[in-house]
Amino acid sequence: MIKEENATPLAGVEVIDGVQLFPGIEAVLVMDSGTEFRQDYDIDAIKIGKYNVAPWGYDNLLPNHLLEKVSKNDIVSANLRFNRDLCFGLGPKLIRVLARSKGKITDFEEVTSGDEFDFFERNDIPMFVMQQLTDMVTFYNAFSELAYEVKTTKIGSIRHREAVFSRWSMQDAKGDIGFHYYSAKWDENPTKNDIICTPVLDEFDSINGLTMYSARRQRLIFPAYMPSPGKPYYSRPEWYSIFQSGWYDHSCMVPKLKKAILKNQLGVKYIIYVSPDYFEDIFRKEGIDKNDRAAVQARIEKEKKAFSDYLSGEDNANKAIMALKKLIPTSGGSALENKWIEITPVANDLKGGEYIDDTESTANIICYAMGVHSALIGATPGKNSNTLGGSNARELYMMKQALMKPVVDRCMRVLKVIKQYNKWDPDIMITIPEYIFTTLDQNKSGKEESTNTNA
């Protein structure tokens, strides 16, 4: 990328991924950055030595792309943190049930000694659970590694394996996934020596699996995931829709674009939207290999120059441009338009408050997609910001807690399996207490503590 101080009419200033500001022609070029999240129903294995790796995303780097995008957006980052912290509650605690009534725990005490306590402390279960929840709310996939004790067949340790470094093997003839591949070099074309291969425990027959592998003291991977239609390998959170719909790009573009406009002391007359289908059609017609990064980038730069030439100069006044589009049928019998090129004029009158309404609307849509009421994590961005009253906020928070129970359950499942296999005392459980916010007339602190048994 050419530096800003050397910018020419043909040089762009990076705004965000896929968005460039062209000061010379006062235009913004927007190329859809959601291609990393396109559907991947047909998966071809990546052959690395003897390993047949099931790619995560079309280029096997979807987790890497996601983390980079999350780091650039304060709304998405805050929502993920809120969802994780809400699931974590007051943190896992090891308790012994002392009394029950109608299926509910009425009295308990914290466990501070014994084999179960040693396991809980040695493996830092609160940290393990937080790591699992972090990956689960981000990727809908979490991976834990179980290891046997040296002198017994009991499970002695459990460790979190980061999802961004984890991949599955391709399914066998029975549709089972047999191995987990762990590597920090997926973005560097790893060799077989860069990959740790570990057998996968069948979560539907875990106890028998642990018994079978115990003689070999084999380390095992236990999978945790949320259901995702049409995804046999890696689940896909519903909120990824913000990348394909364009709202993520819009959210990132507003502050960066405004900064670039003010820094370059000019307005933007045009926004050029370019669909990835446009370039794929060019590559296909001109015989350009999409895996040849140098050739692809050179062709894209050539097309940017063409846009710049078209929009600059008086000779191009009142000219027309032919824009391609594709009609996408819908279930209602109508069709949606997918335009390959769209040039939109922008009316500019910079006064210092531009795009505030856009920021507010975009923030609310992203929060909606991620299931977080914006008032629960702070004031809604924008000039119409307001906060909820105590009662409304309390009810929203408790509703959110209830809706996140499936995520907590999936992360705690592996601890239930360990408890059963290690033959713990049935009255000993791992619970994640939650604050239940109430009114001051019921409790002077305004909150009570629940006992939410999970394992």
Image (cartoon, grey):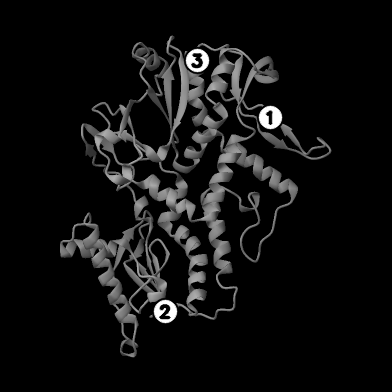
Mark 1 and mark 3 lie on one chain; the one further toward the N terminus is 3
User: Which amino acid is tagged 2?
Assistant: Glu
Q: Residues within 10 Å of mark 1 (few under 14, many from 20)?
A: some
- Residue with the mark numbered 3: 420
Q: Position of residue 351 (x, y in %)?
A: 59, 78
Counting from the top left corner in percent of width and height, residue 418 is at 48, 18
Q: What kind of residue is marked 3?
A: Gln
Helix, strand or loop status at disc 2:
loop
Q: Which residue is mark 1?
A: 450
Dot in front, 2 or 1: 2
Q: Secondary structure at mark 3?
A: helix
> Is 119 positioned to the left or the right of 178 in the image?
right
> Which mark is first along the chain, 2 or 3?
2
Residue 60 at least partly seen: no
Asked which quadrant contains residue 352, the reply is: bottom right
Residue plotted at (35% across, 13% down): 212
Viewport quadrant of the C terminus: top right
Q: Quadrant of residue 18?
A: bottom left
| Residue 26 - label | 2
Q: For marks 3 and 2, give the one nearer the viewer.
A: 2
Q: CA distance from mark 1 to mark 3?
A: 24 Å
- Element type where label 1 sits in the image: loop
Determine the residue positioned at 61% across, 31% down.
91
Residue 23, image x and y in percent?
Answer: 41, 77
